Image: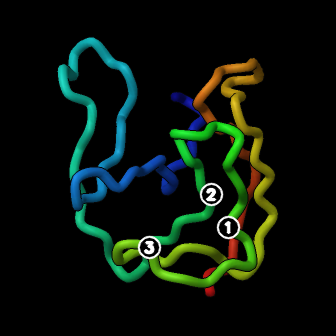
Amino acid sequence: HGSGAEHLIGVRYVDGKWVFDCGSWPEIPNPEFEFTPTSTDVLVYYVDFADGSNSRSLQGENSILYGIQMGYHFGDFHFYPNMWNGRRNDGEVAMRGSFFVPQ
């Protein structure tokens, strides 16, 4: 998306590995890509895809989830579940903000 964040992606932990989804692009038959977390990776928002009503900001949380820092100290993020590009879109999360301070 042209106005998307340069350093934020949605990730999932599946079958013992972290993956990110680059979207539903027809030129990419399998859009999920595996990655290895680094010490600077931070999870800033949590979504339980089995229960779409269970999603939350991770501001103020401080733990490790499968090798990635889960939570951040503070920031100016605002999250909008089930929204994307100004419209309702179930399963997506829109966000606005410009900074966060890691734990």
Q: Where 61 falls versus 88 (above or below)?
A: below
Q: Where 73 falls versus 77 (above or below)?
A: below
Q: Earlier in the sequence, mark 3 or mark 2?
A: 2
For badge 1, the amino acid type reads Leu
Give the secondary structure at mark 1: loop
Can you name the residue that lies furthest to the front here?
A: 51
Q: CA distance from mark 1 to mark 3?
A: 12 Å
Badge number at residue 86:
none
Mark 1 — residue? 58
Q: CB atoms at circles 2 and 1 under 8 Å apart?
A: yes
Residue 62, image quadrant: bottom right
Residue 101 percent coordinates (x, y): 68, 79
For badge 3, the amino acid type reads Leu
Q: Residue at x 54, y 73 (%)?
A: 70
Q: Residue at x 26, y 38 (%)?
A: 32
Closer mark to the observer between disc 3 and disc 2: 3
Mark 3 — residue? 65
Q: Earlier in the sequence, mark 1 or mark 3?
A: 1
Q: Earlier in the sequence, mark 2 or mark 1?
A: 2
Give the secondary structure at mark 3: strand
Q: CA distance from mark 2 to mark 1?
A: 5 Å
Can you name the residue that lies furthest to the bottom here?
A: 103
Near-viewer residue (87 or 4): 87
Badge number at residue 45:
2
For badge 2, the amino acid type reads Tyr
Q: Residue at x 65, y 77 (%)?
A: 72
Please rate how many residues cluster around mark 3, counting C-alpha atoms within 10 Å: few if below 14, some from 14 to 19, many from 20: few
Q: Where 7 falls versus 67 (above or below)?
A: above
